[in-house]
Image (tube, rainbow, N blue to C red):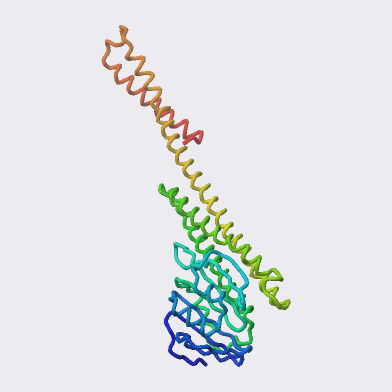
Amino acid sequence: MAVALACSVSIEAILWHPDGRDEEIDLSEPKRRRLSKDQLLWVDLESADEDERASVATALGLSDDAIEALQSELSTPDARVLEGAVEIDVLSMTDGEELEPVPLRILMGREWIITRHDAPLPYLAKHRDRLRDERPIGLLKPVEFLVSILDWHVDSFFAAADELEHKVDELDEAALRRDDDLLQVLVAMRRRIAKVRRIVGRHREVFAELVRPDFVADLDEAQSRALAHEAERLTRASDAVSHVREMLIGTFDVHMTRTAQRTNDIMRVLTWTSVILLPGVVLAGIMGMNFKVGLFDNPNLFWVVIGFMIFTAVVTLVVARWRGWL
């Protein structure tokens, strides 16, 4: 069951109790809240202003460097240990064709986790709704909930790879249809894939830092394995994006093959046109030479020459068809 209280639009705060109850609390007022060790608070800040972030800092009693991390500008992927908190900065992918990354800052304390982002992240809202049931989330340690958030974050990379793969499949069909404007589309798609690949690659050092034994202290074996598993999933996400890049190279090869085939078809038509007309051109050149021969005095021979030209053209076509050249 959930107890809903008035809550700021920019602040979504859910407090889980160990018995499975979840409570939406209001952190818009700057007053201190005390949490027990068997509770877990998730505060999601979306486009929160400075005053709203300050009220959250006051409610949780954050240290000075944690307050600075909460108030400072979102940065590139990084991870560092603060006084009484851990800061993790990542770039999450959003839905849609543009696949624009959204900076996400995660602050983890002893009984709470704060996620801050200046643009909507649909997967956070989706999982927040899923967690509003009778699951005993309060029994989780903050680091275990952090693993869940990182898992959702890596899922956004897999979703981006799936979206890119779907687009490449469409380009394959366009390549088989001989789309004349396909080259520009392929170049644009290559840039999109390279962009996502760079974003995924920038998280390798962050996830490598997370699995270091000296980064988060007092982790048990299961928690360490969970963090290491997320690092492995990031590697698989990078491999998935690389696979899409290889697929695009294959699409480019298909496009170039079809272009070469079309060029060959055009050249074959032009070649056979020349072969068919060549005997007639030679005969016309001979008959048009400037010397006097008695046969030129017979006007009926004109039609004989025309007929011979047509005959040679027909014979050339028949022979080419018989040999399978046409």
Residue farthest to the front? 64
Q: Number of numbered discs present? A: 0
Q: Position of residue 309 (x, y in %)?
A: 36, 23
Q: Residue at x 58, y 82 (%)?
A: 112
The answer to whether residue 36 is left or right of residue 30 is right
Q: Is residue 286 left or right of residue 25?
A: left
Residue nearer the viewer, 95 or 23 = 23
Q: Residue at the spot x=47%, y=30% of the render?
A: 319
Identify whether 187 is placed above or below 80: above
- Can you say whether 149 is above or below 243 in the image? below
* Residue 81 percent location from the top left of the image: 63, 72
Which residue: 48% across, 59% down?
Answer: 167
Camera-nearest residue between 58 and 149: 58
Image position, residue 316 (x, y; %): 44, 28
In percent of width and height, residue 326 lies at 46, 36
- Is 172 rendered above or below residue 127? above
